[in-house]
Structures are given as C-alpha cells and as structure tokens.
Image: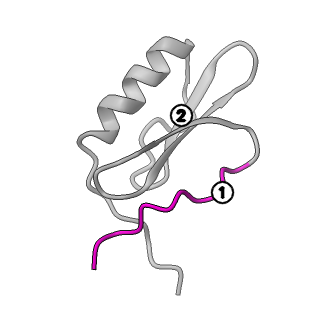
Amino acid sequence: MPASTTPSVWPEGVVARYRTVGGVDINLTDDGECVRLLCSGCGFGGGDAYYPPAAHRLAEKHAGKCRRVAAPTA
C-alpha cells in the first residue's frame, strides 16, 4: 500500500514544509530574523538558524535524499 499523500496539520509556527522521500516532514519556522529547520525523521537541521533563502534550499536538498521513516507511535 503506498504511503499517504494527505498533508498533515502543520504545527503552530511552521511557515513551510518539505516532504522527504522517506515520507516525513521538514518543518521550517520563522522567528522574524531567521528560519529554523528540523527534519522530523532524522533530526537534520536541529533547529539551527538560517537566512530564509538558504533554509529553503537546504531543506529542499535534504528532502530529496533523506529516507528515514517516521518512528512508530505504538
């Protein structure tokens, strides 16, 4: 059965989201001065701060190669 392509609800503060090839999300949050990114699969970005264009490029590049899948919830 293919993975669901239905978008999940964005957490509060998320301004952009990239879906990885593994099916998890990279969330980008904006604090007014910089953008922080965090891959919900592997933890890439670790909440590090970037200027907006760099954050989007980095998230898009990582999304194209991260194959980590979401951890089971039960």
Element under disc 1: loop
Which percent across, then down, holds residue 50? 54, 17
Q: Amino acid under label 2?
A: Leu
Q: Main secondary structure of the magenta part?
A: loop
Is disc 2 surrounded by few (<14), some (14 to 19) or many (20+) residues within 10 Å? many
Query: Which numbered circle lies on residue 26?
Result: none
Please name the colour scheme applied to the rendered image: one colour
Q: Residue at 39% across / 52% down in the picture? A: 42
Check the picture and name the quadrant holding the N terminus: bottom left
Q: Amino acid under label 1?
A: Val
Q: Residue at 52% across / 41% down in the picture? A: 38
In the picture, residue 72 is in which quadrant?
bottom left
Relative to 41, residue 63 above or below? above
Element under disc 2: strand
* Image: magenta residue range: 1-11
Q: CA distance from mark 1 to mark 2?
A: 17 Å
Q: Residue at 29% across / 72% down in the picture? A: 2
Which percent across, then down, holds residue 16? 58, 34
- Residue assigned mark 1: 9
Is disc 1 surrounded by few (<14), some (14 to 19) or many (20+) residues within 10 Å? few
Residue at far front of view: 6
Residue 37 painted magenta: no
Q: Nearer the viewer, residue 67 or 42?
A: 67
Q: Nearer the viewer, residue 15 or 51?
A: 15
Which percent across, then down, holds residue 51? 55, 12
Using residue 29 as the reference point, say whether residue 32 is left or right of it.
right
Disc with the residue nearer the chain's start (1 vs 2): 1
Query: Which numbered circle lies on residue 37?
Result: 2
> Is mark 1 in CB contact (under 8 Å) with mark 2?
no
Relative to 44, residue 58 above or below? above
